[in-house]
Amino acid sequence: MTAGALEGVRVLELTHAWAGPYCGMMLGDMGAEVIKIENPRQKTEARGGYPYVGNESVLFMMLHRNKKSVTLDLKNPAGKKIFLDLVRTADILIQNFRPGLMKKLGLTYDTLKEINPALVYASLSGYGNTGPKADYPGVNMIALAESGLAATTIIGDRPPVPLGYALCDVVASMWASHGILSAYIRRLKTGKGQEVDTSLVEAGISLMVSPVAQHYHVKGDWVAQTGRNDSNAPSGFFRCSDGTYLTVFASYPALWDRFVEVMNLQHLTTDPRFSTRDARTVNAEALHQIIAKIYITKPTDYWVELLVNAGIPASPVNTVGRMVADKQVIAREMIV
């Protein structure tokens, strides 16, 4: 088996929920030795979430693959001494407790760098370690709301649509691992560690570099003005005859030309509502109504084959079962 890129790197992980564990999981997947520090007073159900197999959370097991585990009471002098001995041998520490808790425990970066100046110390929290909201509790749903991501799903009087996934936790973990590895590269050059501080809200904001956000800076609130949450058309999800959904993207001029040809919609090119990309965006609802009546006549797989063969991005809206059986997922060994 080929050694991981981070083989020989020791990571201490003091985390809970999603963001911290996911960050540690990423480093473990790259070959680091990740040691999960757990609280002996922690309730069993706090280790993860549904579904459970026996008394084990499947979510917990996924997020903590490739890790070792140590249970230490950091409020107990003996437990704390063991932990500090581990810190002396560690390269990286990850923690995602609310700001202030590590200070109460006497385990801040400023304290730990005294015993290990080379330590890379990463903090993930709801809002970050500084600022007027630093002490606010923060989870994925709060970050979606605070960052503006949730508002991009508001159409008319419809409330925001939950994404069904801990998006901000995962993105925060990715940014944290990016910061950790950047700090580690600097350490290799200078011998000195560094503190990495990021948050779920900042992760959400990082995803707002989009036409919707840029339109706000230039011309105001795009969603309020147009009733749409993106600036592309045709682009969306369409129900097909087999009851499943198709997604297709043909907004760019070159894609639009292919799209009208393969769909036998050449007459739309002379319709002033659809003759330019800007016009198609403004009149997206009318365009999508025309397309929806066509897609409902045949199954999703028929349309995917037709569109992809014409060079137009299209795919089924996969269920989990369909995704894990997908030939591309299998070929790329995304699930092993």
Image (cartoon, rainbow, N blue to C red):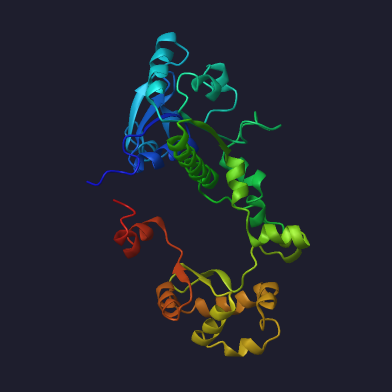
Residue 49 visible from this viewpoint = no
Of residues 205 and 61, the one nearer the viewer is: 205
Residue 207 visible from this viewpoint = yes
Left or right: residue 176 versus residue 334 is right
Q: Work out which residue is located at the far top of the displayed protein and give it.
A: 77
Q: Work out which residue is located at the far left of the displayed protein and give it.
A: 1
Number of disc labels: 0
Q: Work out which residue is located at the far front of the displayed protein and give it.
A: 190
Examine the image and state in which quarter residue 84 appears: top left
Residue at the (35%, 37%) spot, across then down: 32
Residue 313: give x, y in percent of width and height: 48, 72
Left or right: residue 252 versus residue 19 is right
Of residues 33 and 193, the one nearer the viewer is: 193
Examine the image and state in which quarter residue 38 appears: top left
Residue 158: give x, y in percent of width and height: 68, 56
Left or right: residue 109 versus residue 78 is right
Of residues 63 and 31, the one nearer the viewer is: 31
Residue 20: give x, y in percent of width and height: 47, 35
Give above or below for 318 relative to 10.
below
Residue 290: give x, y in percent of width and height: 60, 79
Residue at the (40%, 21%) spot, across then down: 88
Give above or below for 27 relative to 109.
below
